[in-house]
Amino acid sequence: MSGAAHASLIGGQGFIGRHLQAYLLESGWSCYVAEREDAALYQADLGHVFYCAGLTADFRQRPYATVEAHVQLLASILQQSRFTTLTYLSSTRVYAGATATDENASLAVRSHEPGDLYNLSKLLGESLCLSSQRPVRVVRLSNVYGENMSGQNFLSEVLAAAKQGSVRFRSAPHSQKDYIAVQDVVHYLPLIALQDKSGIYNLASGRNLSNAEIAASLRDQGVDCDFEKDAPVITFPVIDIAKLRAEFGAPQHDLANDLPQLYSHYCETL
């Protein structure tokens, strides 16, 4: 990747933002990590904007903050800021209940379901970007894993418990979802930003990993794993990454292979 490019990170203090900033700096970019009330957002040329702001685990308790992060700040930047491109980080959670997972799939959301507020707000952010007639890219991110993850997601909770020697899963063994390494995420995001067209990209591994597979890997490390009786089955659809593969190549990491090292890291640092 050539140097001299400039990036502005919205939500740059989060897990993905921190890793993205480090990767960009190592690759020769200059970076500006913006605060939400920063007047410079509307005064300086922001270069390539990576919009990483958002809520995850606590969105049900903070609906107004969720909409503010996913939509309101975005709307202000799209209307008032100068930038070369803007890459909006959405989520593959929007495919919940869908019959297909390619970028053009029809999606199912229900306004009366509290859990759908997240998907609705992300989709509104996507639509706002794509209707803005500005140079935007939308990236639907899968479940991102890596060192120093937030403590408020499924995998980090499992690994924190594993460090203590035992894990009780609260969802069934055949529950499954897609996981993407943060190293792959920060590799792809600049490539997507610098290509010369707007649109939507799924950024995922393209395969699901089950709770049973995670438990088996941890048992190989000496961790005692069991499952709650009658635990619910929570299954997400396999994400179609044909577009990502065709334009930028296949992801280089896989949680099934990375889990032993990730577990070792948690044991050493937490």
Image (spheres, rainbow, N blue to C red):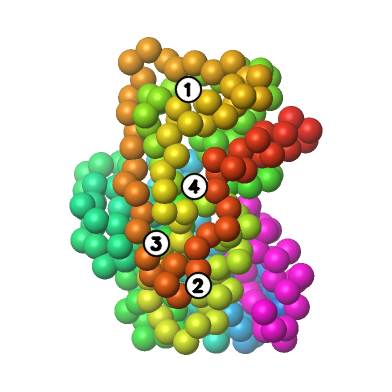
Mark 2 and mark 3: span between their CA atoms? Answer: 10 Å
The quadrant holding residue 60 is top left
Q: Which is more foreground, mark 2 or mark 1?
A: 2
Q: Which residue is mark 4?
A: 179
Give amino acid for label 2: Phe
Residue shown at 61%/64% (left/top)? 186
Mark 3 and mark 4 in contact? Answer it, CB < 8 Å. no
Tell me which numbered mark, 2 or 4, is placed earlier along the sequence. 4
Q: Nearer the viewer, residue 239 or 36?
A: 239
Q: Which residue is mark 1?
A: 169
Q: Earlier in the sequence, mark 4 or mark 1?
A: 1
Q: CA distance from mark 1 to mark 3?
A: 29 Å
Q: Is residue 140 above or below residue 166?
A: below
**Where does the magenta region start and end?**
1-28
Residue under pointer 2:
248
Compared with 220, 50 (above or below) is below
Question: CA–CA distance between discs 2 and 1?
Answer: 35 Å
